[in-house]
Image (tube, grey):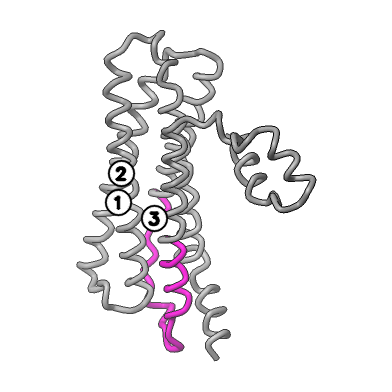
Amino acid sequence: MSSFIKKLFGTLVEKPWEKNQAEIDDYHQGKTFEALSPQVSAVIVIFGVSTVLFSLVLTGYLYTIPKDQDTMFLFKPNLLWFNTLVLILVAYLFRKITKDLENIRLSKIKKNLVQVGGLSYLFLFCQIFFWFQLMNSGKIVSTNSYFTSFYFFTALHGLHLLGGLLFWGKVCSKILKIKEEKIIEEKKSLEALSLYWTFLLVIWFVFFLVLFVFNDTVIAWCKSLIS
């Protein structure tokens, strides 16, 4: 995955209008990403659209914080820490699956893939449970800008996770039905799934740090900009 990221961002900083770069480009005739599978290519497109959406949510939060935002009113439960740990475990399992595919160790891939789905559904269940906790305590969407952004972001993140689970269900059901030695044939689909969940983890970390861990600091910084 690291080599793919280097290739992706390396291409983004290229300057095709310069003579030296133009000569390099002429050798591969636009085939920089020819090794990418259709599944991974689709995930990259989703990355672009999703990054814009999440960036708009984050920007909206930062620019709509009122001067009198009550930071003591924010609800900070341990459940968000638990959910973050769940996503980290999912990323760890995908890392194990990727390594097993590279080393042709196929015996535990089915088990790890099922665990990925179970943990992902656990994450969604905990998020819904947390929503009910918030609403029962009187903290709803219209309470203040913090909770407006919180509900919207977690709903958007949950929808992306559901979309990933649909893809996971299709791949997992197929892998569970085939013989162990044929799992390697689904390598491209598993790589795309791993990349998708890595993206969800990164997005969640940004949200977690800005709206939860360092929220008071972020609000203080935004207030200084407003004043």
Q: Position of residue 170 (x, y in %)?
A: 28, 29
Pointer 2: residues within 10 angstroms few (<14), some, or many (20+)?
A: few
Q: Which residues are magenta?
A: 54-82
In depth, the one of 130 and 156 nearer the eye is: 156
154 is within the stretch colored magenta = no
The answer to whether residue 21 is above or below residue 144 is above
Query: Relative to 2, is 194 on the left or the right?
Result: left
Q: Can residue 200 be spotted in the picture?
A: no
Amino acid carrying label 1: it is Leu
* Image position of 105 with respect to 24: above or below: above
Residue at left offset 47%, top offset 71%: 59
Calculate the distance from the C-alpha at mark 3 to the C-alpha at mark 1: 17 Å
Q: Secondary structure at mark 3?
A: helix
Residue placed furthest toward the right: 20
Mark earlier in primary sequence (3, 1): 3
Q: Are marks 3 and 1 in contact (CB under 8 Å)?
A: no
- Along the horizontal axis of the image, is 103 left or right of 136? right
* Residue that numbered label 3 is attached to: 80
CB atoms of marks 1 and 2 within 8 Å: yes
The crowd level at tag 3 (other Cα within 10 Å; few <14, some 14-19, many 20+) is some
Task: Give the mark, 3 or 2, whose residue is nearer the N terminus.
Answer: 3
In this orientation, does residue 61 appear?
Answer: yes
Three-letter amino acid code of the residue under disc 3: Leu
- Return the residue found at the far bottom: 227
Q: Residue tagged by mark 1?
A: 159
Mark 1 secondary-structure assignment: helix
Question: In percent of the image, x 65 and y 41: which residue is there?
Answer: 6
Whole-percent x, y for residue 150 in the image: 36, 66
Rendered image: mark on residue 163: 2
Label 2 sits on what residue type? Gly
Q: Choose top left, top right, bottom left or bottom right for residue 52.
A: bottom left
